[in-house]
């Protein structure tokens, strides 16, 4: 299968799920009372576009991901759930770097624990990774991950929207036996609102390390900027400009650049009960 055909296949799948997402109303937690009430078909899709690596000077980057879950078991409170899932990820860049040009479908299962302002998950999956310019490999992966968010920009009373996530696991079959850890944090302040759009100055930082010492997996990227954040349930979009600085630990490369970016996220629950039902 040619690279172009793979890209077209991915884009078709992502478009179909994104159209499903756009047709859904804002998802709400299922009414509690039994294990059956906690079931559903939650899913998400997101895309990031921009020049996101100062060391890779002038390199345009796009990453897309789509996931469909099936919450087959849930605790009575809904805070604990078991979700088989299928997902598809795609990364492309304009300079053809091996680690930035790949497609990765997977089928897996994860255990999720909802906590205050976030969720913690542990999972395993069978995944296939095709790096278009070099290798293909498949195998089982293990991981733990979390996400926390506070003061959602969707609420007009909130002034300090922020989020953080972290992930750790052997998530790349091509990088066999490589354990990768990543973490991200962002904090903003709402400077002004224009209806559903907010103007948000922000600061952010990303840290990545691995056990095999690959240059692209061992770095710190940090910076600040200004973004417009737009919320229209069930989607969230932001675009902005900022200054990023990147330090790579093993090669010693360091650089800064002006970054322009667009982020999009959409979530849905195909069987979730609507509010008031």
Image: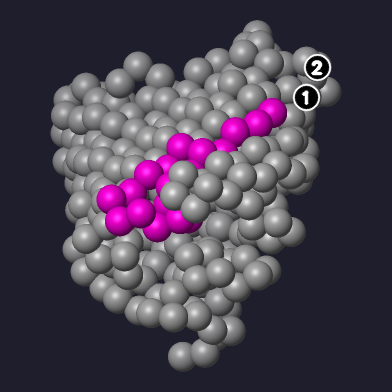
Is residue 223 visible to us here? yes
* Left or right, 270 with reference to 111: right
- The structure residue drawn at horizontal position 69% and vertical position 28%, both measured from the top left corner, is 224
Residue, disc 1 = 199
- Total numbered circles: 2
Q: Position of residue 258 (x, y in %)?
A: 77, 42
* Left or right, 73 with reference to 62: left
State the quadrant of the C terminus: top left
Question: In the image, is residue 225 above or below residue 87?
Answer: above
- Which type of secondary structure does the marked residue at label 2 adopt? strand
Q: Which residue ends up furthest to the front in the rendered image?
A: 252
Is residue 266 visible to us here? no
From the viewer's side, name the closer residue of 2 and 112. 2
| Residue 258 image label | none
Q: Position of residue 118 (x, y in %)?
A: 38, 25
- CA distance for labels 2 and 1: 5 Å
Residue, disc 2 = 192
- Which type of secondary structure does the marked residue at label 1 adopt? strand
Few, some or many residues within 10 Å of mark 1 (<14, 14–19, 20+): many
- The structure residue drawn at horizontal position 44% and vertical position 80%, both measured from the top left corner, is 134
- The structure residue drawn at horizontal position 65% and vertical position 70%, both measured from the top left corner, is 95
Q: Position of residue 64 (x, y in %)?
A: 54, 58
- The structure residue drawn at horizontal position 30% and vertical position 56%, both measured from the top left corner, is 212
Question: Which portion, as a residue range, is magenta?
Answer: 207-224
Quarter of the image for residue 106 reads bottom left
């Amino acid at each position: 299968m040619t690279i172009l055909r793979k890209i077209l296949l991915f884009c078709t799948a992502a478009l179909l799920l994104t159209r499903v997402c756009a047709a859904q109303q804002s998802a709400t937690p299922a009414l509690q009372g039994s294990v059956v009430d906690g079931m559903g078909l939650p899913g998400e899709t997101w895309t990031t576009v921009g020049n996101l690596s100062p060391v890779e000077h002038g390199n345009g980057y796009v990453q897309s991901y789509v996931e469909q879950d099936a919450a087959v078991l849930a605790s009575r409170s809904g805070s604990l759930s078991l979700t088989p899932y299928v997902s598809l990820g795609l990364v492309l860049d304009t300079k053809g770097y091996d680690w930035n040009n790949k497609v990765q479908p997977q089928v897996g299962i994860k255990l999720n624990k909802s906590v205050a302002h976030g969720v913690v998950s542990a999972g395993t999956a069978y995944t296939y990774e095709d790096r278009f310019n070099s290798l293909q490999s498949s195998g089982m992966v293990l991981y733990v991950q979390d996400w926390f968010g506070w003061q959602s920009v969707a609420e007009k009373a909130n002034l300090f929207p922020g989020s953080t996530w972290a992930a750790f696991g052997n998530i790349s079959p091509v990088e066999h036996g490589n354990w990768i850890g990543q973490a991200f944090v962002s904090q903003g302040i709402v400077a002004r609102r224009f209806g559903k759009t907010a103007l948000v100055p922000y600061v952010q930082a990303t840290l990545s390390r691995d056990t095999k010492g690959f240059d692209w997996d061992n770095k710190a990227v940090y910076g600040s900027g200004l973004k417009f954040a737009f919320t229209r349930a069930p989607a969230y979009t932001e675009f902005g400009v900022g200054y990023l600085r990147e330090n790579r630990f093993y090669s010693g490369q360091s650089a800064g650049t002006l970054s322009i970016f667009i982020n999009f996220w959409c979530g849905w629950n195909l069987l979730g009960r609507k509010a008031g039902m």
